[in-house]
Image (spheres, rainbow, N blue to C red):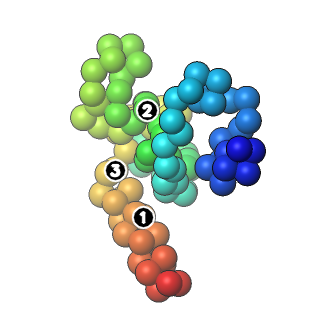
């Protein structure tokens, strides 16, 4: 059991494990730059619920907010980074 959690990158006594919630896959897009505040962040597309749901209103978001200044991130830049990651993985395969 512990080895499986290690492979899924989930800690043994994390909230996901204790509550019985199934851990989802992770896809991190590294070094995304906010065009407003120039902050650099890593986005976890699969696990970061702040990208999809507004925590105050619990409504779906149409934009992806920067975690530092809350301005909209450039989705085309994120998509370009995803394509670069995919291309690297295909070449490495």
For mark 2, what is the residue?
49
Place residue 15 in its image quadrant: top right
* Whether residue 30 is visible: yes
Secondary structure, mark 2, is helix
The residue sitting at 68% across, 29% down in the picture is 14
Which residue is nearer to you in this view: 82 or 31? 82
Does residue 78 lie above or below 51 as drawn?
below
The answer for how far apart the CA atoms under marks 3 and 1 are is 11 Å
> Which circle marks residue 50 in the picture?
none
Q: Which of marks 1 and 2 is nearer the N terminus?
A: 2
Residue assigned mark 3: 74
Mark yes or no: residue 43 visible: no
Q: In this view, does 55 lie above or below 14?
A: above
For the residue pair 47 and 79, the one nearer the viewer reads as: 47
User: In the image, is 62 to the left or to the right of 54?
Assistant: left
- The residue shown at (42%, 72%) is 86
Q: In the figure, 6 relative to 49: above or below?
A: below
Q: Residue 21: x and y, percent?
A: 52, 29
Residue 81: image tag? 1
**Residue farthest to the left, as pictured:** 62
Q: Earlier in the sequence, mark 3 or mark 1?
A: 3
Q: Nearer the viewer, mark 3 or mark 1?
A: 1
**Number of numbered discs visible in the structure rendering:** 3
Which mark is nearer the camera, 1 or 2?
Answer: 2
Q: As drawn, is 68 to the left or to the right of 36?
A: right
- Tell me, yes or no, whether the two marked residues, 1 and 2, touch with CB atoms within 8 Å: no
Q: Nearer the viewer, residue 58 or 17?
A: 17
Nearest to the observer: residue 25 or residue 43:
25
2 or 3: mark nearer the eye: 2
Tell me if 56 is positioned left or right of 32 in this view: left
């Amino acid at each position: 059991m512990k080895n499986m959690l290690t492979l899924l990158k989930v800690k043994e006594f994390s909230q996901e494990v204790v509550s019985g919630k199934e851990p989802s896959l992770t896809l991190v897009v590294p070094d995304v730059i906010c065009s407003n505040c120039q902050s650099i962040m890593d986005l976890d597309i699969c696990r970061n619920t702040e990208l999809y749901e507004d925590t105050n209103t619990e409504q779906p978001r149409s934009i992806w907010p920067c975690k530092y200044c809350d301005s909209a991130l450039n989705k085309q830049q994120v998509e370009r980074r995803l394509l670069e990651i995919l291309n690297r993985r295909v070449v490495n395969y």
